[in-house]
Amino acid sequence: METVVIGVIGADVHAVGNRIIEYALKQAGFNVVNLGVMVSQQEFLDAVIETNAKAVIVSSLYGHGELDCRGMGDRFIEAGYGHVLLYIGGNLVIGKTDFSEVEVKFKAMGFHRVFPPNSDINEGIERLKEDLLKS
Amino acid sequence: METVVIGVIGADVHAVGNRIIEYALKQAGFNVVNLGVMVSQQEFLDAVIETNAKAVIVSSLYGHGELDCRGMGDRFIEAGYGHVLLYIGGNLVIGKTDFSEVEVKFKAMGFHRVFPPNSDINEGIERLKEDLLKS
Amino acid sequence: MAKIALEVFLAERAEVLKAWPTGKDVHLEEAIEYQKSIPDSKRFSSVLKKADHERETLIQPRAGVALPQEHLALLKHLQDEGKADLLPTTIDSYTRHNRYVEAQVGIDESIKTGKSLLNGFPAVNHGVALCRSLNDGLKVPLQVRHGTPDARLLAEITLAGGFTSYEGGGISYNIPYGKNYSLEKTIRDWQYVDRLVGYYEEQGIRINREPFGPLTGTLVPPCISHSVAILEALLAAEQGCKCITVGYGQCGNQAQDIAAIRSLKLLTKEYLDRFGYNDVQVTTVFHQWMGGFPQDEAQAYGVIAWGAATAVLAGATKVIVKSPHEAFGVPTAEANANGLKTTKQLTQMLKDQNNVDSPLIQEEMRLIGEETHSILEAVLKLGENDFALSAIRGFEAGLIDVPFAPAQCNANQVLPARDHHGAVRIYEFGYLPFSEELKNVHRDKLDERAQAEGRDVSFQMVIDDIYAVSKGRLVGRPR
Amino acid sequence: MAKIALEVFLAERAEVLKAWPTGKDVHLEEAIEYQKSIPDSKRFSSVLKKADHERETLIQPRAGVALPQEHLALLKHLQDEGKADLLPTTIDSYTRHNRYVEAQVGIDESIKTGKSLLNGFPAVNHGVALCRSLNDGLKVPLQVRHGTPDARLLAEITLAGGFTSYEGGGISYNIPYGKNYSLEKTIRDWQYVDRLVGYYEEQGIRINREPFGPLTGTLVPPCISHSVAILEALLAAEQGCKCITVGYGQCGNQAQDIAAIRSLKLLTKEYLDRFGYNDVQVTTVFHQWMGGFPQDEAQAYGVIAWGAATAVLAGATKVIVKSPHEAFGVPTAEANANGLKTTKQLTQMLKDQNNVDSPLIQEEMRLIGEETHSILEAVLKLGENDFALSAIRGFEAGLIDVPFAPAQCNANQVLPARDHHGAVRIYEFGYLPFSEELKNVHRDKLDERAQAEGRDVSFQMVIDDIYAVSKGRLVGRPR
Ligand code: B12
Ligand code: B12
């Protein structure tokens, strides 16, 4: 059973999607470490170090994702956890925006996969399974 | 009391606006000859000849205005009634269209004033009074 | 008059088919074979039956452009993107007036300019095979929607062309849609259409028939449109039609609208039963607001949604959907699909809560019942229970009188106005056969409003009401 | 605890104002002079009073961007184009968490990049003078809308800045908006805010207070949000607030929603009266659907319109409006105005027909009344009628329990689900102080649905319900 860390980054309190993601990952057979809402970059990293998780699923709904995620990939690399899969999804930026721009922006911050608003979490889990097989 | 001929051109049966236009013109002190719906170009011309009207208010709602109004201005000129004011309003073409295009098209057909969808008839009457003073 | 004798019908047919060259491609036996090949999922009567049973409200747009390929693409978009449950083919205005030569000009010009210059699909000019190509290319049932006083040839071609429902009637497609048509002739021509549908029925093919409910779409009190719908249902049943959808155009006051749809179904069944047509499948259609729309699209969405909500809460079998482009012109495929999507959101969100009732609704139902009975009893008496004669004499006498109708055979004496709560009432009764008590109900309700507004009920009030919805209100209060 | 003593309050004030440099520009006397200069047409309490009297439902958007000029332009657009009756200033999430340094980064970056990188207006960083420039530039009343657990400094600055209404409360801005905040502290901090409003009131300035009704916006049963709203109303009244707007987030079943708004007003008054606060002006606010929205804009318009219609029929004093961009992100000015226009079309079209009632509505009102009484009586008993203590102990004991809340001080035992008609019921009661009879009402209603769907009530059903509206339905049926 692979371990996945999940949480909602920054000062974001949107809790509903987070609870469903936990449920869906468990249904799919993962071991889930749910940090809940209002999670800092460092808390995500600490949890990965502590639990030896293979992937992190970050959610950001409230629009400050762009400010909250800066340097996240580097932080993981510097700590020696560059191999951990970083996924992010939610309403990542402020306002209705062309998603391809958003994807580029967040990939540049070190995320391996970036998902548009209202993405089906089960599809995200399918991608995760594939990526975990590859890595 | 100036006489104005009104009617709805072509195979168009939209009767509601026509009734209101008659009422508004009468309120404004005009003598109104209302040909009702489904009026042909020739019927408009005949009514003008018969009543010595100074202006014609054509309505077209149903979308075939472009086909129905072709040659209308010429018909009036050829009959020696080129001095009669030709106004048109309603939903002149099919579909939501940039009005400036529509205006050019109908002016080319000989209309002196062209009004966009849902125009306030009382504003049309104001223009008519001005134009009648000038002519 | 009873059911038209087969020989009479067939003799007339021969003439009808000659009116335009495409008529010669209609062969009844072959048409019936083709109709038999249409699966239940694409047959109006079956889909309506299922919806009625499951208490679902189906959604249907209006749509029609000049050329077949473009028209098919448009319908596909409405089916796939708009999730329409039922599809229309709206016929252009030239065809509606049997002006096939002008329709041909429109077709040719449309080909030349690359955009549709007709406000609908000229099905007669296109003929049977092209109609079938529509039906073959789609997954949901197809209906002809028009406004044609003499729709005999159109019916021949489109039913042979695989359409499974046909809108209209000798009254509802005359009074709001013409100027000089004789009611006698249009009713007779529509008896032909009904007889044709009856013929298909005899051969095991059920075609849905839908009298056009909203009439002029402008402040028509429910009792007047109900009277017309019921007369046309009787006329259709007489010719052998077994699947009838009666309609009503939203007035805007929800209690009145819900009551209207519910009483429409009850009253139609009552009269059909009374004359022995108890095997007719009766369903209802609710038309989203048919009067002038707001120009602003966001406001238009509000009107569309309100119509959708009322349709479901009323329990209508289907709802005819408007688009956010309504005030401007024939909608683009996208705008049309958007109207459908707004509507579907509401039909789906509300379908589990459609058992609303209230004393207000009950009171409106009682009122509509009494009014409609008053009109129909007087009308049927006048024609000695001959439905065609009753209708003709009823209009002649002004016993039925449709507000704002262009037709000269309509008395044009009745004037409606909204009451203080927005329900449509009558302020000039003309020759409507209402008792004084009944008239006083209307007068009292209008007085309540007049007093609140500090003015008399007048034509200016009616004009204010006509404009109101397009200006963002329901009741046209003075400013 | 009773009303905070003036000296205690003033001593605390001195500390509060030090938290960020802009605090030093707040001077109470001068602020009161400024507030006195605000005309009635721009004062929340006056405009609400008039609407309540005339039974109008006012419309109000959410809106906030990082920079003052842009924010003013946005509000002007919503006022002029969207015809908003009341305007908001939505505060950004950093300010809500008193992270003024990060808010400043957001401001600076927004200036640099030329677009708003904050999800709201950082009023604390901008300070009193810039707040006043908003008020001076607008024609309608302004309210602060946020989600701030410790909103003391924000209140000082914005009330001095001319805002005439302040949303929030020690419970409603803790439970859905935080993770580790102590309820004791947030309630105490909000008593400060209420005391500040009470101070203004003593000086003749009436500030409207609005507990945040929808909480998590996700399947919150009316009795739970009502209990919170009433506790916060009592807390506010205790500190001298005299104008309170209690709120509720649409659940989607119309009978339940109408009953919720009506009972909310009655229950709030009942409890205020019981504790001697019978001079409080109570109004209601209805929030259009607060859960996940459909992505498609046409569908979103449907949801918005349904909320607008329900708000009016329920007789809410105002309705908070969503935009067609809701599922994506903070709306553009245009999208926001569009939501307003759809809403206004319906509030205007329906205002004359808002006297609906039905046995269904009556039954829901009875149910909500009984549930809310059960909760509040138990809670008040636990705190010996000390409202703050009651709330704290009530949450501790799980007597009040908000579904899907992130706060650790929330029991998180209650799970809601929709019944067969879409009304929100409770399937896991946790420690809610309901009698067995009351619980059985819920169980029976949920069983009815479970049976119809051929499955048990389960977390999967809850998830289906959470997604349902965004997928175009109300009840999350299995597919
Ligand atoms: C009611 C209505 C009907 C009723 C008409 C009943 C009747 N006999 O009167 C019914 C249901 C029968 C009907 C039928 C059809 N209709 Co129709 N109808 C409408 C609707 C909803 C309102 C029209 C109305 O009464 N408005 C209220 C009056 C007061 O306003 P008005 O007519 O616009 O007139 C005012 C102004 O335009 C102005 N005005 C008019 N003329 C002039 C001239 C001058 C000089 C000036 C200054 C001002 C002026 O002053 C008038 C008084 O205020 C409009 C859409 C809309 N506007 O919301 C569609 C609309 C006009 N109809 C349309 C169509 C296509 C049809 C049909 C072909 C069928 C269909 N698709 O279902 C048939 C055509 C029948 C025919 N042969 O004509 C289209 C026209 C499309 C286009 N131009 O692109 C419209 C725009 C709807 C749409 N978006 O598709 N319709
Ligand atoms: C409910 C809600 C709230 C509730 C939240 C209650 C709570 N504590 O949970 C309340 C009312 C408190 C609230 C507050 C705020 N909200 Co809010 N909220 C919403 C809303 C309506 C629904 C969110 C939700 O629960 N959806 C249902 C769940 C199941 O879906 P989800 O959260 O999207 O998560 C799913 C998917 O995104 C996906 N997913 C998520 N993460 C990931 C990651 C990966 C890798 C993958 C594959 C998938 C995935 O799977 C999840 C499960 O299905 C949304 C708009 C919408 N979506 O309709 C706005 C929204 C998210 N909120 C917004 C904002 C701005 C706020 C506020 C700032 C206040 C405001 N303007 O009023 C505050 C912020 C508070 C804070 N500090 O965070 C904005 C964000 C704007 C932006 N990004 O541009 C939104 C988009 C609304 C809007 N259009 O303005 N909100």
Image: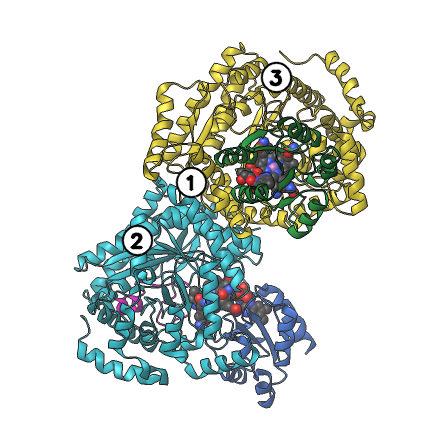
Chain colours: A blue, B green, C yellow, D cyan
Q: Nearer the viewer, residue D51 or D3?
A: D51
Q: Residue B80's spot in the image, x, y percent?
A: 72, 34
Q: Dot 3, crowdedness within 10 Å: few (<14), some or many (≥20)?
A: many
Residue type at mark 2 is Lys
Residue D72 drawn above or below residue B131: below
| Pointer 1 residue Cβ closer than 8 Å to ligand 1 | no
Residue that label 2 marks = D50
For the residues marked 2 and 1, what is the alpha-carbon distance in whole angstroms?
A: 21 Å
Q: Which residues lie in the magenta part?
A: D390-412
Query: In the image, is D256 to the left or to the right of D188?
Result: right
- The residue that disc 3 covers is C238
The local secondary structure at tag 1 comes to loop
**In the picture provided, is D366 more to the left or to the right than C172?**
left
Mark 1 or mark 3, whichever is nearer to me: 1
* Helix, strand or loop at mark 2: helix
Q: Position of residue D246 (x, y in %)?
A: 32, 59
**Circle 2/circle 1 CB separation < 8 Å:** no
The N terminus of chain C lies in quadrant: top right
Residue at mark 1 to residue at mark 3: CA–CA distance: 40 Å
Instruction: Point out residue D55 in the picture as x, y percentages from the top left corner.
Output: 33, 48
Q: Which residue is mark 1?
A: C475
Q: Is residue C63 above or below residue C342?
A: above
Q: CA distance from mark 3 to mark 2?
A: 59 Å
Q: Main secondary structure of the magenta part?
A: loop
**Which amino acid lies under the numbered mark 3 shown in the image of this protein?**
Glu
Determine the image quadrant of residue C281. Answer: top right
